[in-house]
Image: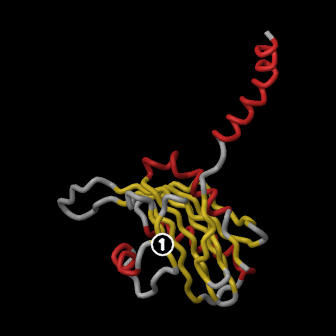
C-alpha cells in the first residue's frame, strides 16, 4: 500500500518529465561555418562535399556550407556575398528580398516577414511556401512546392544568407527544426 501511495505522489513528476522530453527541441550540434559564425545543425544532417555542393547549388559563388538530411530532400545552407547595404538598411532589405522572392516563384505564401534579434544580432526573416509550375507549352510536370525559412544578416561589407528548405508536404515535420536552427545562429 505504501508503494502505491509513493507511486501516486511521483506520478505527476514523472508525467512532467515525460512531457518535457516529448516537447524538447530537435538535437542540434554546434558547427562552425565561417570565421566567426556558428550554427546548430541537426544531428542527422551531413555536410555536403564540394562536388555535392557544386551539383546541387550551381553558382559562381559557392556557399560557405551546405548540410543535408539523409534523404537529401532537406537542406541547410549558408552563403556569403559582398553588399553595399549596411545593417541599418534591414527594413529596406526586407522589402527588396520579399519582392525578389515573389518574382522568383510562381506562387508564394508568406508565413512570416520580419526583422528579429537572434543572439544579440538582427536578421531579416522571411518564412514562406513557394510553388514553381511548369509553364512550358505542353509541359506536364507537377508543381514543386517548398517550405523555406531564410535569414539575412550584414556584417561589414558582407551579406550572410541562412536558408533552411524542405518539401512543403513535410513542413509540419521540419518547421520546428528550422526555427531551432535559425535561433541557434551566432555571429561574432
Q: Residue furthest front?
A: 2
25 w.r.t. 66: above or below: above
Residue 33 vs residue 138, the one in the foreground: 33
- Left-right relation of 17 to 66: right
Residue situated in front as seen by the camera: 105 or 152: 152
Residue at the image position 57 percent from the left and 66 percent from the top? 150
Q: Quadrant of residue 162?
A: bottom right
Q: Quadrant of the C terminus?
A: bottom right
Q: Residues within 10 Å of mark 1 (few under 14, many from 20)?
A: many
Q: Does residue 157 sit above or below 77 in this rendering?
A: below
Q: How was this image coloured?
A: secondary structure
**Percent x, y for residue 29?**
60, 63
Q: Is residue 174 left or right of residue 94?
A: left
Between 112 and 120, the one nearer to me in the picture: 120
Residue drawn 75% across the image and 72% down it: 121
Q: Residue at x 47, y 71 (%)?
A: 47
Q: For mark 1, what is the residue?
A: 66
Q: Position of residue 69 (x, y in %)?
A: 44, 60
Amino acid at each position: 500500500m505504501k508503494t502505491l501511495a509513493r507511486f501516486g505522489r511521483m506520478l505527476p513528476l514523472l508525467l512532467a518529465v515525460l512531457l518535457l522530453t516529448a516537447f524538447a527541441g530537435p538535437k542540434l550540434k554546434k558547427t562552425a561555418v565561417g570565421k566567426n559564425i556558428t550554427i546548430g545543425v541537426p544531428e542527422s544532417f551531413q555536410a555536403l562535399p564540394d562536388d555535392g555542393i557544386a551539383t546541387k547549388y550551381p553558382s559562381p559563388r559557392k556557399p560557405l556550407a551546405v548540410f543535408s538530411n539523409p534523404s537529401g530532400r532537406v537542406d541547410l545552407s549558408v552563403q556569403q556575398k559582398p553588399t553595399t547595404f549596411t545593417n541599418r538598411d534591414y527594413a529596406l532589405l526586407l522589402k527588396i528580398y520579399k519582392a525578389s522572392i515573389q518574382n522568383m516563384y510562381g506562387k508564394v505564401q508568406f508565413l512570416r516577414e520580419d526583422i528579429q534579434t537572434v543572439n544579440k544580432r538582427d536578421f531579416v526573416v522571411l518564412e514562406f511556401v513557394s510553388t514553381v509550375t511548369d509553364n512550358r507549352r505542353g509541359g506536364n510536370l507537377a508543381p514543386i512546392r517548398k517550405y523555406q525559412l531564410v535569414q539575412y544578416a550584414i556584417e561589414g561589407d558582407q551579406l550572410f544568407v541562412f536558408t533552411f528548405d524542405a518539401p512543403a508536404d513535410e513542413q509540419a515535420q521540419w518547421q520546428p527544426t528550422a526555427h531551432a536552427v535559425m535561433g541557434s545562429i551566432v555571429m561574432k
